[in-house]
């Protein structure tokens, strides 16, 4: 029934297109009318080759490819649609194509989806209990966001109790509640209980869904994240490697869950100081993203930015400069004008120039960012640029200017960055360095102590 509805819809859609006179499209209409999706797909692909900039045709091809069970071809159509949108500066069309790609790469193969549905099924007579369970989980999440950890623990413990008594331990809702309890324990600072909850949820998910099921792997990655935060880097890395290998064998390249695991591994490697290994692995990930989602997807810019950051940490400044230039080119192609992403990339590029001793160039770039961010009212980008400008002043020996800028950035941060303590820490350390350069050693010592308190 669903196939007939889709075929009818696509046939109607194609009949309205300006390109319908094309022989391939005419033949595709006939194939759709006969219910032959595979033939229609081939004919639409032929028409798309002849009309590479026709986004409506490409969108139709993607829809038919999905219905025919060929997601790889659907992704290809969508990538081409994104490329076509970039050529005419259609940013809304680009966002639409990328959103469709994102949705495509979150889909699970049918077997996994059916297993999840069966494992989470709730009988009609238990609907009220399921609703109560969801309300308790929501209450726990809201309490966590408010920093009320004890209240979150009570709510999540209640959710687990309801799930266990109502649905049984071998039910996906119970497993997820146990996983969430591990997260609360971790934030409460009770590592033994957190590890036990995560590990038990992981084992139960493997038993219920299978060792290679993506939802079981998600819990494995949660456990890896816990180990990483607890300083057990070797255990975290091992679990991440296993997860990435399993996901790579069961999901298409570029799948959202696989990318999440890969980025988590990069973070683990960076945290362990294995920067060369991290950047080499990240370059592979960036290549996978481009191959699966195209060169104009936001993840490409994010991956390049991370890569440039690691090059900077390694002192490979020429490579960092080149990658930041690629980031700026990507932003210029995919965004309508200067905004936070461009301002941030320019500020980071200026920091690379400063580290290379190219102070005049760094100052020029940062001055431009300060002016542009001020004009559009982007306070965050403005303060980031000013913080880097303070470093340039310090390196050039203009210490009063460095002190004035850094103090004002800190004043802003103490008001606006309470949820971002690392930003405050870095600004305090920079202020201490300025005091040190000025010979104000007691002030420097006091500032460093405040930063590390």
Image (cartoon, helix red, strand yellow):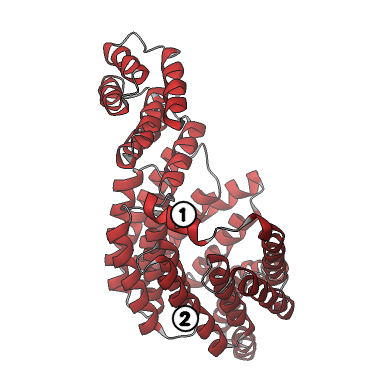
- Crowding at dot 1, Cα within 10 Å, few <14 / some 14-19 / many 20+, comes out as many
Query: Could you say where residue 118 lies in the image, as x and y percent from the top left?
Result: 49, 58
Compared across the picture, whether 447 is left or right of 155 comes to left
| Residue 199 - label | 2
**Residue 112, labelled with which disc?**
none
Q: Which residue is mark 1?
A: 345
The answer to which quarter of the image holds residue 19 is: top left
Looking at the picture, does residue 341 appear above or below residue 36?
below
Which SS class for mark 1? helix
- Asked whether residue 29 is in view, the answer is yes
Q: Residue at x 43, y 68 (%)?
A: 216
- Nearer the observer: mark 2 or 1; the answer is 2
Percent from the top left, x then y, of residue 171?
53, 68
Tell me if I can see residue 363 in this picture: no
Work out which residue is located at the far top of the displayed protein and give it.
21
Task: Give coordinates of residue 52: x percent, y percent.
Answer: 31, 24
Q: Is residue 175 left or right of residue 62?
A: right
Q: Secondary structure at mark 2?
A: helix
Which of disc 1 and disc 2 is earlier in sequence? 2
Bin the neighbour count of mark 2 within 10 Å (Cα to Cα): few under 14, some 14-19, many 20 and up: some
């Amino acid at each position: 029934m669903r196939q007939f509805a889709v075929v009818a819809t696509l046939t109607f859609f194609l009949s309205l297109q300006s390109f319908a006179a094309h022989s391939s499209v005419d033949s595709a209409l006939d194939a759709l009318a006969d219910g032959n999706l595979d033939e229609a797909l081939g004919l639409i692909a032929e028409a798309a080759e002849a009309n590479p900039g026709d986004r409506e045709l490409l969108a139709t091809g993607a829809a038919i490819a999905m219905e025919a069970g060929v997601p790889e071809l659907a992704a290809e159509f969508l990538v081409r649609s994104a490329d076509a949108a970039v050529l005419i500066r259609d940013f809304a069309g680009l966002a639409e194509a990328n959103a469709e790609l994102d949705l495509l790469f979150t889909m699970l193969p049918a077997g996994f989806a059916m297993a999840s549905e069966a494992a989470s099924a709730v009988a009609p007579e238990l609907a009220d209990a399921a609703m109560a369970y969801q309300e308790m989980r929501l209450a726990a999440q809201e309490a966590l966001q408010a920093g009320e950890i004890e209240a979150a623990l009570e709510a999540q413990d209640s959710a687990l109790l309801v799930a266990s008594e109502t649905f049984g331990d071998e039910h996906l809702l119970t497993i997820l509640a146990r996983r969430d309890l591990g997260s609360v324990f971790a934030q409460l600072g009770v590592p033994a209980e957190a590890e036990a909850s995560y590990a038990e949820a992981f084992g139960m998910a493997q038993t219920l869904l299978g060792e290679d099921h993506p939802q079981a792997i998600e819990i494995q990655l949660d456990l890896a994240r816990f180990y990483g935060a607890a300083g057990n880097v070797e255990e975290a890395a091992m679990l991440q490697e296993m997860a990435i290998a399993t996901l790579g064998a069961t999901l298409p390249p570029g799948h959202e869950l696989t990318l999440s695991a890969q980025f988590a591994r990069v973070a683990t490697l960076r945290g362990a100081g294995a920067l060369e290994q991290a950047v080499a692995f990240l370059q592979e990930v960036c290549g996978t993203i481009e191959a699966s989602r195209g060169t104009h997807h936001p993840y490409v810019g994010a991956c390049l930015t991370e890569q440039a950051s690691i090059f900077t940490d390694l002192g490979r400044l020429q490579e960092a400069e080149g990658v930041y230039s690629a980031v700026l080119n990507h932003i210029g192609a995919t965004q309508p004008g200067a905004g936070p992403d461009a301002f941030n990339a320019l500020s980071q590029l200026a920091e690379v120039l400063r580290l290379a001793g190219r102070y005049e160039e760094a100052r020029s770039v940062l001055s431009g960012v300060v002016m542009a961010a001020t004009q559009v009212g982007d306070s965050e980008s403005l303060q980031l640029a000013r913080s880097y400008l303070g470093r340039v002043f310090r390196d050039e020996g203009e210490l009063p200017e460095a002190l004035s800028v850094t103090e004002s950035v800190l004043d802003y941060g103490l008001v606006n960055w309470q949820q971002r303590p690392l930003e405050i820490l870095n600004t305090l350390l920079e202020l201490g360095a300025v005091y040190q350069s000025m010979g104000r050693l007691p002030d420097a010592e006091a500032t460093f102590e405040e930063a590390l308190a």
